[in-house]
Image (cartoon, rainbow, N blue to C red):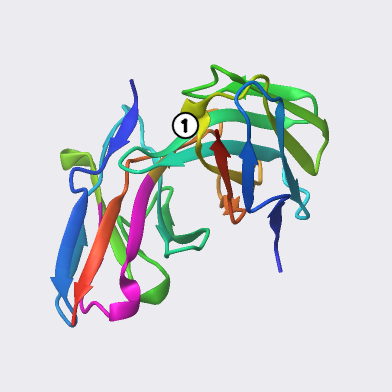
Amino acid sequence: AQSVTQPDIHITVSEGASLELRCNYSYGATPYLFWYVQSPGQGLQLLLKYFSGDTLVQGIKGFEAEFKRSQSSFNLRKPSVHWSDAAEYFCAWMDSSYKLIFGSGTRLLVRP
Amino acid sequence: DVKVTQSSRYLVKRTGEKVFLECVQDMDHENMFWYRQDPGLGLRLIYFSYDVKMKEKGDIPEGYSVSREKKERFSLILESASTNQTSMYLCASSLLDRLYTEAFFGQGTRLTVV
C-alpha cells in the first residue's frame, strides 16, 4: 500500500544543534508531500509542502525539506534547533483523490 | 482567521452509546476529514468527504459512520461506542485544489469510552 514512513519515533537534540527528521514515501508518481507540527496540547500546523519544481522547499519557523526522488525521501531539516521546536512532527502525502495520509510521527525532544 | 471547530474538547461516553462528534469549518472548503490519533500510530484516516453527501472510507472506517448534509459540517458517528475507540479525534478541511491545498485542523476531541 502507498504510504509514508517515519522511521524515528523519538529524536533528542541539543538546543542550537542541527536537526534532520526522516520521511520516506512509497508512491510511483511524484507525490504531494507535507510536513506538519503538533505542539503539546495544540492542533496540527503546516510547516511546508512540496508539489513540484524546486526540490528544496522552505517553510515556516526556519524549517526546510528536500525532496529526493532517487531515495524516495522528503526529510525535514533545521540548522539550529530552539527549545520551542520540541513537538511532534508528521510527514504526510496526498493521493490522487485528495486524501491526506500521515506517517506515524517523530517526537522531538530538545536538551537545554 | 481560518477556523475548524470541533464541538467538544473532551467527551466521556459509556460502552454501547451512540456518539456524535461534530466539526464545522468556515472556509468554504470542499474536502473534510476525520482522523484518530493514537500514540505511536500517528493520524489514521477514518473517513473523508469531498462534497456534500459524498464520503469515502479511509484506512480504519470499521465502527464509524459519517454525515455531511451541509458543506461546512462533517459529523463522525460511533454507532455503538467501544473502549477501543477511546482516542483523540481530529477533524480537518482543505480546498479541492492541489496547488493551494493545505489541510487545516481542529483542536481535537479526546473521547474516553468507559
Q: Quadrant of residue A62?
A: bottom left
Q: Is residue B44 above or below residue A22?
A: above
Describe residue A94's horizontal placement relative to residue A106 as left or right.
Answer: right
Describe residue A88's horizontal placement relative to residue B74 as left or right.
Answer: left
Q: Which residues are magenta?
A: A75-91
Q: Quadrant of residue A65?
A: bottom left
Element on which disc 1 rests: loop
Q: Residue at x 63, y 53 (%)?
A: B9
Give the quarter of the figure containing the N terminus of chain B: bottom right
Q: Label 1 is placed on what type of residue? A: Asp
Q: Quadrant of residue A71?
A: top left
Q: Is residue B50 above or below residue B39?
A: above
- Report which residue position mark 1 lands on: A95
Task: Report x, y in % for residue A30.
Answer: 36, 37
The foreground one among B43 and B77 is: B77
Describe residue B112's horizontal placement relative to residue B29 as left or right.
Answer: left
Task: Report x, y in % for residue A23.
Answer: 25, 46
